[in-house]
């Protein structure tokens, strides 16, 4: 028997398999595999293979675009959007278009070719998060941009074209549709109840305790009630915060801890699966949406997912969050 | 250089690669492969392997659940939703849920194990479309249902678990989110302009002639301006029609012709790729939305598609529709 569940933020319904849920051994997974590092543009000594670096945390005695860095940011060699030029938005009959203005940066998370985020020390993960903030604070000065999207593709099954661990930041001249939907839903809730829907969700999860993977002083990690994918995980600050990039250094340390923990748990349960994560944060168009609350969504890419969800907006989920967390909690750390 | 394009119906932006588009040879494709037919539940003689048939076009002298049919409809053996029971919708704090009431039917398109829709005769394709209608007309009598979704997964890369060609019909007790978005967008346009946005889109495509794959007296097939995927194709009735299932027999013949043609073209250009199609039609909740216009969306599943679009709502498209149609038009039929 299945159950229909509605996401309270955007109103999406999912069909959840309740009686015969898939458990980890039923889900096809191709564990992550590292190709040879020889020609990796993200390894020490190969810095010349990338466009010149934008920013880096590096040993003070080392030079730009040379070895000695811990986190390094470079422009994407094949950018989806270009930084130069003015935004030229125009209509074409009923259609709308614009030139592809934006920024597309790569955050190389570690010099080690075969280390992923969960392998890094807490301080190193904190540095990656800190770099996300610094790049966001820099890019938000550019008035052409309305939204900053930070995401990670891990493994070719999740769309990564290079093995060496990295994340991406895309600055967009418009707010993406999925964010508009979250803003609308959370905005309507805020207007109606004068409360943040994300804060209420955290309160309910803390009450019910049925979907929480882990928590610490500042963050909570849970499998959402209306998960779109088996083992989907959300990491959220417990305090109401609009913008990711306003996070304090203390919160960064706390987030690094919870992120490392959930990634280790996911890796253990699902055999190092490909995954994506995305930081959902408020737009930088100058408006402050009081009903919004930034968070990170982590989606393992398990190959049994049909994926026709793309076209239909209709998600059939084989593993309820209440089942997923049993496995995730069980991992010994 | 890329270009940002906005879908006029739902307002989704896509990033289109203009200067170095991917052409068919750049797109990874796994051609369709048929497993052995021996234990195929959709082949003649194996009718006992499916749940009892709901409806079929069959030779009058043959018996139900035996060989001799041309198109056969059976309940899905592993249904996403169950037909029995009352809809029990309730709240759980901020969450909403319901039991999984609905219908999930399989339309077996042909008795031939190794024939796909494009291999069938026009009359046979017409019969498949006719069966979609008949099942829709039957299911719409059930007042619990608000939406009927007809779709096809072709090939394991598109989520099909059985090779033998079939489509699916899911009756839902709610309107899916992607349809609500289309209804909102087209409804707002209709209110503002007193015209159907889909009709205007057809008019513009007929004017510009840049994205039309083919057309006949009643239907047009084109690659949409803001395609989400390389070689995405839409088939639309030229006349303003709200419901797919009200299609006349004459229109069915016309649609069969255009559908066969676009599937043959896609198969030739992309080496028999996995694909999904979905019929987008008006909800059956009793309301008539004058601004809506039913159509079919066909999406080849090419493996270079990263697919992180799932989470971000952000589509980077490597092949503009204007490039795709050059290849599609070039096929000799």
Image (cartoon, coloured by chain):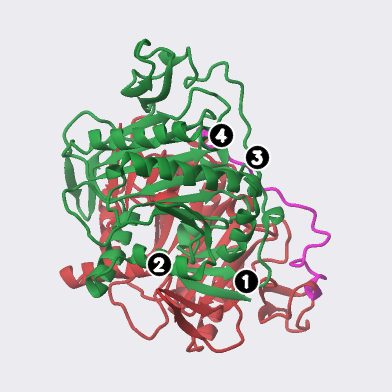
Chain colours: A red, B green
Label 1, label 3: how far apart the Cα atoms are = 27 Å
Visible in this render: residue A79? yes
Of B285 and A118, the residue lying toward us: B285
Residue occupied by mark 4: B119
Q: Residues within 10 Å of mark 1 (few under 14, many from 20)?
A: some
Dot 2, crowdedness within 10 Å: few (<14), some or many (≥20)? few
Dots 4 and 1 on the same chain: yes
Q: Residue at x 23, y 33 (%)?
A: B138
| Residue B236: x %, y % from top left | 40, 54
Q: Is residue A117 visible?
A: no
* Residue B96 versus residue A87 in the image, above or below: above
Secondary structure of residue under mark 2:
helix
Reading the image, the residue beneath label 2 is B203
Q: Which residue is mark 3?
A: B31
Do the residues indicated by labels 2 and 3 lie within the same chain of the protein?
yes
Q: CA distance from mark 4 to mark 1?
A: 34 Å
- Subunit that carries the residue with mark 1: B
A77 or B186, nearer to the observer: B186
Classify residue B104 as left or right of residue B277: left
Residue A35 placed where, x, y %?
76, 52
Is A35 contained in the magenta span?
yes
Q: Position of residue B14 (x, y in %)?
A: 50, 68
Q: Is residue B68 left or right of residue B321?
A: left
Task: State the quadrant of the N terminus of chain A.
Answer: top left
Q: Nearer the viewer, mark 2 or mark 4?
A: 2
Range covered by the magenta-colored residues: A25-48
In the rendered image, residues at marks 2 and 4 fall on the same chain: yes
Q: Which residue is mark 1?
A: B18
């Amino acid at each position: 028997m299945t159950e229909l569940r509605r996401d309270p933020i955007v109103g999406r319904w999912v069909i959840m398999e309740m009686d015969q849920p898939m458990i980890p051994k039923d889900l096809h997974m191709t564990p992550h595999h590292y190709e040879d590092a020889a020609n990796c543009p993200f390894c020490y000594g190969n810095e010349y293979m990338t466009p010149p670096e934008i920013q880096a945390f590096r040993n003070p005695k080392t030079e730009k675009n040379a070895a000695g860095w811990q986190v390094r940011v470079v422009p994407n060699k094949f950018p989806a959007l270009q930084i130069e030029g003015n935004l030229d938005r125009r209509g074409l009959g009923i259609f709308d278009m614009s030139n592809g203005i934006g920024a597309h940066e790569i955050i190389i998370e570690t010099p080690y070719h075969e280390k992923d985020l969960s392998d890094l020390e807490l301080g190193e993960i904190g540095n990656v998060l800190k770099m996300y903030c610094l790049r966001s604070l820099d890019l938000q000065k550019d008035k052409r941009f309305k939204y900053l999207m930070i995401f990670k593709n891990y493994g070719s099954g999740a769309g990564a074209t290079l093995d060496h661990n990295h994340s991406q930041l895309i600055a967009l001249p418009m707010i993406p549709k999925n964010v508009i939907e979250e803003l609308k839903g959370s905005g309507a809730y805020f207007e109606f109840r004068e409360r943040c829907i994300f804060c209420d969700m955290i309160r309910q999860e803390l009450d019910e305790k049925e979907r929480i993977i882990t928590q610490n002083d500042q963050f909570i990690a849970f499998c959402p009630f209306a998960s779109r994918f088996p083992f989907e995980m959300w990491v959220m600050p417990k305090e109401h915060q609009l913008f990711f990039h306003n996070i304090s250094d203390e919160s960064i340390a706390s987030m690094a801890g919870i992120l490392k923990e959930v990634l280790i748990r996911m890796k253990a349960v699902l055999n190092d699966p490909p995954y994506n994560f995305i930081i959902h944060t408020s737009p930088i168009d100058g408006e402050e949406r009081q009903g919004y609350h930034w968070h990170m969504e982590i989606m393992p890419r398990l190959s049994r997912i049909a994926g026709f969800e793309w076209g239909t907006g209709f998600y059939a989920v084989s593993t309820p969050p209440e089942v997923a967390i049993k496995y995730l909690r069980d991992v010994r750390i």
